[in-house]
Image: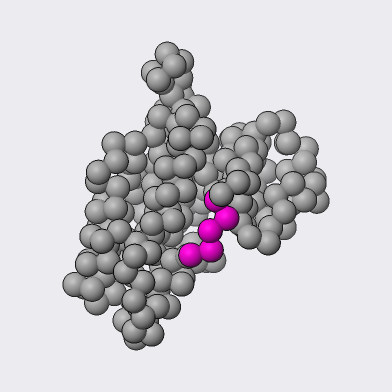
Amino acid sequence: MGTNGGPRKIGIYGSSFDPITNVHLWTASTVAHRKHLDFVIFLPSSHMRHDKKPNISDEHRIAMIRLAIQDNPKFVLDTYELTALAGMHYTYYSMRHFHEQYPDDELYFIMGADLLADIADGKWSHDEELIAGNKFIVMARSGIDMTEAIARSPLLRNHDDGRFQLMSKGLAMDISSTYIRDEFGRGGEPRYLLPDACYDYIKQHRLYQP
């Protein structure tokens, strides 16, 4: 039961988290606050994805997510996609899994506007089933017009019935996991862009080194 006595509101935050960053944590916290979510599930994406292959092992990604979220009771780790069978690691199946796990609650898939644009461009598997059966919280990204992405896609605009909650203020931050990996790889110092425990973990295990 949620804080208002009704069904709980749960956010599913899928990303490679390679590594998890302070921006991930800040955006998840902001989304939870603004949308009154009871908790946010951090869902590291499968290494079987063809578009984003992780640079480190699943074990390292899991360890750093645990370190990053350990002090926030509203943040939960779920490794469903890391153990999913081949062909079942897509977001559609993940959301189907969570609907089965939380049948009485409201679920929202949290994603950046770049992913919304990818769906509009037909780059997602099982996109019709995913959009038809779920609600979404979409975070702004620099250079992407979220309403235009919805308008240009017949799939998205024909389901634009309130299921897309667009968050356009204060969430368009450009510090990415890619930037942090590049900094580590070039001998840079991205210390304050990720949690201290994760920074120490990367240094200890010599991750993202050239």
Q: Residue at x 32, y 45 (%)?
A: 77
Residue 132's place in the image compared with 123, above or below, is above
Residue situated in front as seen by the camera: 123 or 28:
28
Q: Position of residue 104 (x, y in %)?
A: 45, 21
> In the rendered view of the protein, which quadrant contains the C terminus?
bottom left
Asked where in the image residue 190 lies, by quadrant, the reply is: bottom left
Residue 86 is left or right of residue 210, and the answer is right
Residue 128 is left or right of residue 192, and the answer is right
Q: Main secondary structure of the magenta part?
A: loop
Q: Where is residue 59 in the image (x, y as percent from the top left)?
A: 26, 61
Residue 119 is left or right of residue 46, and the answer is right
* Magenta region, residue range: 171-175
> In the rendered view of the protein, which quadrant contains the N terminus?
top left
Can residue 105 be seen in this snapshot? yes
Q: Where is residue 185 in the image (x, y as percent from the top left)?
A: 37, 82
Q: Which residue lies furthest to the left in this view?
A: 204
Can residue 84 be seen in this snapshot? no
Q: Position of residue 182 (x, y in %)?
A: 42, 78
Q: Which residue is drawn at 59% across and 35% down?
A: 135
Asked where in the image residue 92 lies, by quadrant, the reply is: top right
Residue 75's place in the image compared with 23, above or below, is above
> Is 58 contained in the magenta span?
no
Q: Residue at x 23, y 73 (%)?
A: 203
Residue situated in front as seen by the camera: 29 or 19:
29
> Is 173 contained in the magenta span?
yes
Q: Residue at x 32, y 69 (%)?
A: 191
Asked where in the image residue 157 lies, by quadrant, the reply is: top right
